[in-house]
Image (cartoon, rainbow, N blue to C red):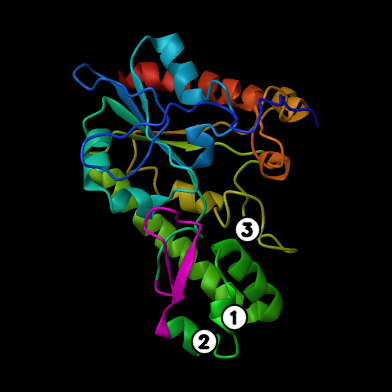
Amino acid sequence: MTYQQPGPQGLDYRACRYGTSRLTFRGPARMLDKPYIAFLGSTETYGKYIPVPFPALAEQSLQVPCVNLGCVNGGHDTYLHDPYVVEMAAQARVCVVQIGGAHNMSNRFYTVHPRRNDRFLRASPLMRQIFRDVDFTDFAFTRHMLESLRRFAPDRFAMLREELQAAWVARTRLLVQRLGGRAVLLWFAGHRPPDGPDAKGLGPDPLFIERWMIDALREDVADIVDATLGTAAQAAGGAGMVVPPGEEPVAAGMPGPAAHAEAAERLLPVLRRHL
């Protein structure tokens, strides 16, 4: 796969902050004194390696400020621990919430870093009791831990996966309630939401999200947009990404500019309805 090679620093994301938030967002910073659309999500919403991510594309078409509040490796905990950002998003005319995986958030079994939600911090007493034969000091990232547990104890892992799915539904409902019901959920992935768990591994991103989980939230949100990558975006892959040398393996698993263009196109009619 071919990427643009920009030099050691890569794209200038024009990093910015808002108010009292400790989070760093992709800039340039937007003025909030006029009606705007907010975007919450993880690395894809932030647009890592993407010259013009889908929030910026939406802004170009709608001529309405689109505030990109996506966070690299962020999840629900990132936002629920930052009341200032949630209040910003709640004051938007509409807020797009990217559907992220169920693994990067604190739950009854383990705790993640409050801002970098992919970082595993510690196992709960319940987790240590169920997996008493596992040394959790070996893990720094949630995905590595979960893959190890799946291989080591698949029966016990199934119980953990079900807990994460239930927690994701509850935590997503809490987040969209704090947004005042003006949330649009965005499915942005290379496959449609599956009907059941993956039989061979953890499954693709967003991890552990199944169709029933999204359906359970239909009454809580303003809309749901399916931006499953089409054939053209799949074929384009990472063409047009700006990737510093050495970061190609990370970029390889992410949607490219063509996928972002498709996501913006799917979002536009829904956003126009809610403006």
Visible residue check, residue 172: no
Tag 1 secondary structure: helix
Using residue 216 as the reference point, say whether residue 118 is left or right of it. right
| Nearest to the observer: residue 245 or residue 235 | 245
Q: CA distance from mark 1 to mark 3?
A: 17 Å
- How far apart in space, not on screen, are marks 2 and 3 (Cα)? 24 Å
Q: Which mark is residue 196?
A: 3
Which residue shows up at 73% across the image and 24% down it?
239
Crowd band around label 3 with a 10 angstrom C-alpha radius: few (<14), some (14–19), many (20+): few
Percent position of residue 227, x then y: 57, 31
Looking at the picture, which amino acid does disc 1 mark?
Answer: Arg
Q: Which residue is mark 1?
A: 156
Q: Residues within 10 Å of mark 1 (few under 14, many from 20)?
A: few
Asked whether 112 falls inside the magenta stretch, the response is: yes
Between discs 2 and 3, the one toward the N terminus: 2
Which region shows up in magenta?
108-125
Counting residues from the start of the chain, the first of labels 1 and 3 encountered is 1
Farthest residue in the right direction? Answer: 1
Residue in view at x 64 percent, y 38 percent: 254
* Mark 1 and mark 2 residues within 8 Å of each other at the beta carbon: yes
- The residue wearing badge 2 is 130
Vertical order, 109 against 194 (above or below): below
User: Along the horizontal axis of the image, is 215 left or right of 84?
Assistant: right
| Disc 3 element | loop
Camera-near label (1 vs 3) is 1
Q: Tell me residue 107's x, y (percent).
A: 40, 68
